[in-house]
Structure formats: structure tokens, C-alpha cells
Amino acid sequence: MLNCFAGCPYSAIARAVGIASPTPRAARRFTSPLEEARATVLAEARRQPWTWARETYAMNRAVRDGRRRASEIRAATAIRLDWDELARAATLETYLAALEHALETA
């Protein structure tokens, strides 16, 4: 067994040491029927078209990031009391509430 801590491939290590470079065999691992079934189900799930879920997650992420940004704006303006920035935060929160409502009713 040869190992290079720099990440060199097996063939490069064997060539450097001066030995023939047979293809290393992967260690066989015992898998139970439950593990095989789980792997089959996960492989099938990965093949499914989950575009609707990705879009929903992206929209939820936008709402979460927007709420975080509005909170940051409010915190920053609380010190210097900038009414324009507070209005901007309120507008953002109104938009996010409408988006959140649309996601819940879809």
C-alpha cells in the first residue's frame, strides 16, 4: 500500500518508487440489504426532476436574505436615525411579506 500526502495518484507513486503500476483494487465493503435499498432509493431520487423544489428553496432563501438585510438596515439606522433608510427597510419588508404570502398560497 502506497500513500502520498501531497495527493499524488497511485501510478505516479509507483513510478517514483520504481515498481510496476498495477491498477489498485478498491476495497470491497460489505453492504447490508438495507444499505443497498437505501442506496437504490437515493440514486432514484437524484434522477428525479426537482426543479420546482429548487425554485421554492431559492425563493425562500431570497426571503430569508431580504429579512436579514432589512434587519441590518434597521440596526444601522437606529444609531443615526436616517428616515430614508428606515423607509427603504419598510418597503423591503412589505415586498418580502407579499412574496412570502405568494409562496404559502402557491
Image: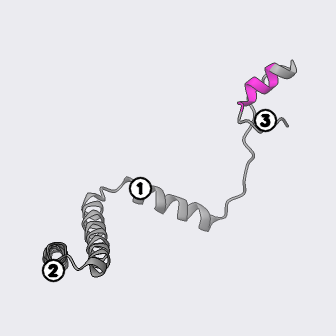
Q: Answer with left or right where residue 102 lies relative to residue 72.
A: left
What residue sits 28% from the left and 81% below the top? 78
The CA distance from mark 1 to mark 3 is 33 Å
Q: Amino acid at mark 3?
A: Cys
Q: Which residue is mark 1?
A: 46
Q: Which residue is mark 3?
A: 4
Which sits earlier in the primary sequence, circle 1 or circle 3? 3
Height in image: 29 above or below 34?
A: above
Does the magenta-highlighted stretch encompass residue 11?
Answer: yes
Out of 10 and 4, give the one closest to the viewer. Answer: 4
What residue sits 60% from the left and 68% below the top? 34
**Tag on residue 101?**
2
The CA distance from mark 1 to mark 2 is 30 Å
The CA distance from mark 2 to mark 3 is 55 Å
Q: Main secondary structure of the magenta part?
A: helix
Which sits earlier in the primary sequence, circle 2 or circle 3? 3
Whole-percent x, y for residue 63 in the image: 25, 71
**Tag on residue 86?**
none
- Dot 1: within a 10 Å radius of its alpha carbon, few (fewer than 14), some, or many (20 or more) residues? few
Task: Magenta stretch: give its range.
Answer: 8-15
